[in-house]
Amino acid sequence: MCDYSLEHLTSRPAKVGEKLTTRQFNSTSGFAAPEDINMAVCVLPGTELAFASPIRCKRPMWWGGWKPMSLSHTTAIFRQINKDNAYVHHDALEFPDGKKVMLTHLDQDQEATVLQLPVQPATAAQVKEQERVHYIG
């Protein structure tokens, strides 16, 4: 998290063990620390999160509108997808079954604990995987 859509906000990196809250920041969603909901907490791709309860989100319907849903998962890994497209949101959560949900589809005010940060990359492929999308345009 903390790609181009959050560059204008005050932000800081996530820490292991801290509790974060899902929050709407202007046109995108992200994580904030409960003590300062106006500060975005940047999560690196590969960060493992545990939610306090099953994850609530909304799914787009084919005819328009959104369908609320609750997932059976309480753990996820933060990912960035569609990195080659500068004009879409990139932040997503990947669940144990391999499915992904965009962070912008999560309901607000859900609590998540940072379980583990990604290991420091040792290969060029790992460096590329952990790169955050950063477009200025």
Image (cartoon, helix red, strand yellow):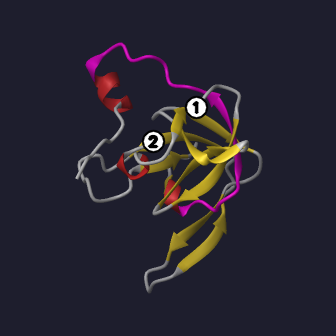
Q: Is residue 33 left or right of residue 124?
A: right
In the image, is residue 64 above or below residue 136? below
| Spatial CA span between label 2 and label 1 | 14 Å
Residue sitting at the far top: 122
Say which amino acid is labelled 2: Arg
Q: Is residue 131 left or right of residue 86?
A: right
Please, what is the three-letter code of the amino acid marked with disc 1? Answer: Ala
Q: Is residue 79 visible?
A: yes
Residue 17: x and y in percent read: 70, 27
- Magenta stretch: give its range: 105-124
* Left or right: 75 as drawn, with respect to 79: right
Q: Counting other residues with Cα less than 10 Å from the Cα at mark 2, is it few (<14), some (14-19), or many (20 or more)?
A: many
Q: Residue at x 49, y 79 (%)?
A: 61
Residue for badge 1:
14
**Mark 1 crowdedness (10 Å alpha carbons): few <14, some 14-19, many ≥20:** many
Pointer 2 residue: 79
Taking the image as drawn, is residue 42 in sight? no
Residue 134 among those drawn in magenta: no
Q: Nearer the viewer, residue 28 or 60?
A: 28
- Comparing marks 2 and 1, which lies closer to the viewer? 1
1 vs 47: above or below: below
Identify the residue at horizontal 32%, vertical 23% (top origin). Answer: 127
Q: Earlier in the sequence, mark 2 or mark 1?
A: 1
